[in-house]
Image: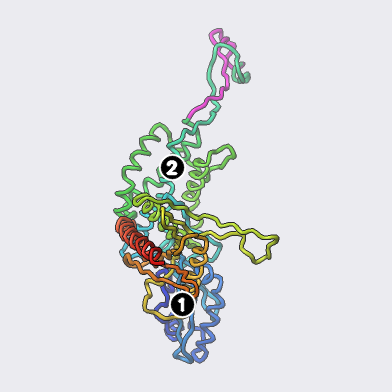
Amino acid sequence: MDVFCEIPCLTERSPTFSALDLRKKFFPGAHKNFLAEALQKFITYNRASFDFLEITPTITGSDQGTSIAFRTSRYVGAVPLRAPDYGKQIGDFVVPPRFVGRDRFVDYIEILDLLGNEISPEVVDSLSLASGRNFRPPFYLEAAKFIRSLELMLRHPWRKFDTVEVVLNEPSGQVNWRKYIQHENKAENKLRFPVRKNVLSELHREYGQLRFVFDICNKELSSPNTPQRVRTAFRSRLSFIENRLYLHKPVPVEAMARRAADSIVVRECKVQANRVLRREFIDSTAWRVDFNDVFEKFVQYIFRELAHSIGGKLWANPRIQTRTSHYYAWELRQLEPDAVFQTDDLIAFVDAKYKSHLYNKFETTELLKEDFRRDLHQVLAYTSFTTTGEKLGIICYPSNEIEIKTTRFKNALNDASNRVVIVGIPLKRSVIPDAIRQIASKIDWLRTASKAIAESI
């Protein structure tokens, strides 16, 4: 079988898989009277793969009623699995994005295009995926990222010296004497010297190599394999880049060389070009994408736009330094909240967590409680660094729809208080205007409430 199972990321508990059914389908060599031991051995055999995607398997039941369920986390990807009886490959565990619809990566493309953030699949050496190319990261993901990096590079001049041979009437520069003596016996060639010159130009070989990679990506982003929304979004960009590269002829290349003299934008463009070029060699091994990074940048973008709309400032990933005479090995050298949002009369610490809490609002598992307790304590620790009377922390979770919930914590001993706002944000570009409007409305309410509390003291 190509696929062992397919469970979306942020699934708190998957449907259970009967050990008897798994034995019939995937590992018939396991003894029917020792199914719990077979499942435990299955987990042990595949521990590295489960850890790579942060998949937590759980065994329940006993004897022939034994079953297994899985908890997935922030990672999207695919890993190969082995059977517990003979260790043979039985299929892939696939974790797709938690998006609805047939084109599951389209929302991901739109968000990355909005953020301008280069987040690439992380690949690890493993068995080849049994599903082959069926569950690899779609090629248009890498193609889209290359087009963005190439578009950025085209805004900067990239000229290099090319060595060309020209014929001059005087021997100035590096003369190719060997070639000269082959023709100098004729009187009309006495003053025709083949000379090598260094010419500064944009029409150099490496630009031609990028044109070669661009043609590959252009073909992919214009093909029926790419979702219509992505094709429409990139059509004008592809046309613009093709016009800019009209004079550059494609030069086939297997890998682009990176040089110390390359600027940052050129270096990043070459890195992405090499990802495109070597994709055929790495697309069949275990891979993952950390959607926590995507969600964090998405939340920072929303609060940055919020700051622009209502008047305020946003600091992304500010560092709170620690000072001490000496550090223990396990001590933190700094704290780093995801964002700090500030207006004239309010400061809020924002923490983005790509976790499943708002998809499981009425579940009471200890894992959910413990995860939230850690998130809550973390944001409360950040709010201790504000000098305002009432402290504000914001925890952002992904959700099916925009939702905002406020909780106030008050210390009866000294009337000190904290407010923690839980904000649910769908990971979709289309929700940004509504998210900004609702968060702005909540912040206005919080500012009014804080003033009323201050006046009553």
Mark found first going from the N terminus, 1 or 2: 2
Q: What's the residue at 33%, 52% (across, down)? A: 230
- Foreground of the two, 261 or 364: 364
- Foreground of the two, 143 or 450: 450
**Image position of 136 (left or right of 401):** right
Name the image quarter holding residue 183.
top right
User: From what the image shows, is residue 15 above or below residue 246?
Assistant: below
Tell me the SS state at disc 2: helix
Task: Give, as a three-letter code, the residue at label 2.
Answer: Leu
Residue 113 visible within the image: no
The percent position of residue 223, horizontal first and vertical second, equals: 33, 50
Q: Which residue is mark 2?
A: 150
Which quadrant would the N terminus be assigned to in this image? bottom left
User: Which dot, 1 or 2, sits closer to the camera?
Assistant: 1
**Image position of 228 (left or right of 88):** left
Q: Which residue is mark 1?
A: 369
The region drawn magenta spans 181-201
Tell me the SS state at disc 1: helix
Badge 1: residue crowd in 10 Å (few <14, some 14–19, many ≥20): few
The residue furthest right is: 326
Q: What's the residue at 56%, 7% (across, down)? A: 187
The residue furthest top is: 187
Which quadrant would the C terminus be assigned to in this image? bottom left
The percent position of residue 348, horizontal first and vertical second, equals: 44, 60
- Foreground of the two, 78 or 216: 78
Real-space Cα separation, disc 1 to disc 2, in angstroms: 45 Å
Residue 136 visible within the image: yes
Query: Does residue 363 belong to the magenta stretch?
Result: no
Name the image quarter holding residue 93.
bottom left
